[in-house]
Amino acid sequence: MFVLLALVMTAVFMGGMRSMVSSGWRDAGRPLIADYVDRLAAEIGTPPDPSRAQALTQRLPLAVRIEGPVVNWESHPGRMAGRGFESRAGDLFSRSTTDGHKISFGLGSLPWQRGPQGVVWFTLGVLLLLLLVSYGVVRRLLRPLDDIGAGAQRFGRGDFDRPIPIRRNDELGDLAQRINTMARDIQDMLDAKRALLLALSHELRSPLTRARLNAELLPATPEGETERAALLRDLGEMRDLISDLLESERLASPHAALSREHIDLAVLVHDVVAELPQEDELELDLAPDVPLMSLDRTRIRLLLRNLLDNALRHGGRAAGALRPPLLSLRRVEGAVEIEVRDFGPGVDEAQLERLAEPFFRTDSARQRATGGVGLGMYLCKLVALAHGGSFELRNAKPGLSVRVRLSLALPPAGDAPDTMRARAFRPRGDIA
């Protein structure tokens, strides 16, 4: 845009100057030029004398051509026809003598045409250098806008650790300072919200534990056994909800580290499947070339458990699926991909994008008994992102497919990912 603007401004300036000269000076200069041409023709004489014309061209930067019945002579053969003076000025540069000769005048060899060509290239080089310097100055003036744009993207991703650098003390510097202040305020509000949610969840654990213990100690009577089982089931759902809330806030917080260790994903998958009551309803496709990976064992176990629970709930035998859910583990393009696919009814496309949002449940899963609390997929996404991986949901037709891709690149020792840092983690079943 800068180069285009420079070219347009140059063209407009040159066109305007040319229009001004041609329109403003044409009437004033035409009679002067006509009088000068008359004097030149008179100096050549009648009949025209080529020697006088030759002396005239040596003294002045002119080209002369004589045409007639006796004399036909040209000082610069081909030059005047190539420049086209007669076509542009008509008879202004031509005179006819009384003996039938026509004398035409034009420009000859100009001084700068005879001089060295290096001056032209030097001028072009200076103009190019000025253009580059001007471009660099403009880019330097606009650099704070690039910093503000990059800072806004970081803040949008939740990375508030790096403020926008303040490079100048003008309006752009003041804008960057105000955006940094806004980012700090947003970070404080998010930290306060997380702290409040964590505090409430921790405080709810104690009375919930006591309520569950009291329910367990109730005398077992035939009349109250049904109510006791329903109460324990509700308390279990509350326990799971509090545990999921605590874990989601820990994963969403940028202030702790994953407890990484070298684990064999295939062995971990077998361990998680063995813990499920519907173990025989699952199909496994585990590639043999999956290497050891540096992962948080507890959280990867949580991810696998939630994905399998969801697949069995919505694509198992109870849901009338044509075949059992399939868990695939394979190595692809420098990463390991975990895919859990069921063969149930799938999810409506309009709801698919929101399936990994917290507390979102599809229309077909509004009951707690079949739909959970809406945090399972959200936790799986947080675990994948915490390990620097990706999380993808798609309709496999039939069924739903969830793909988690984890990079094989090991992080530096003691380095935690920028996206997630987690503190201590308690298993979901432990509410003590």
Image: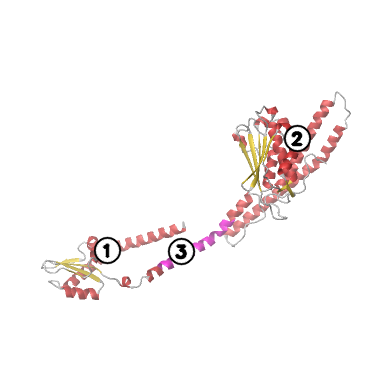
- Main secondary structure along the magenta-highlighted residues: helix
Nearest to viewer (mark 2 / mark 1)? 2
Looking at the image, do the residues carrying marks 2 and 3 touch, with CB atoms under 8 Å apart?
no
Report, in whole angstroms, how far the alpha carbon at label 2 lies from the one at label 1: 99 Å
Query: Does 156 appear above or below 325?
Result: below
Side of 61 where 369 appears, left or right = right
Q: Are the residues tagged 1 and 3 within 8 Å (C-beta)? A: no
Task: Give, as a single range, the part of the protein colored magenta.
Answer: 123-147
| Badge 2 amino acid | Leu
Q: Which of 93 and 290 lies nearest the eye of the viewer?
A: 290
Q: Earlier in the sequence, mark 1 or mark 3?
A: 1
Q: Secondary structure at mark 1?
A: helix
Answer whether residue 162 is magenta in the image.
no
Image disc number at residue 276: 2
First along the sequence among labels 2 and 3: 3
Q: Amino acid at mark 1?
A: Arg
Q: Is residue 138 left or right of residue 106?
A: right
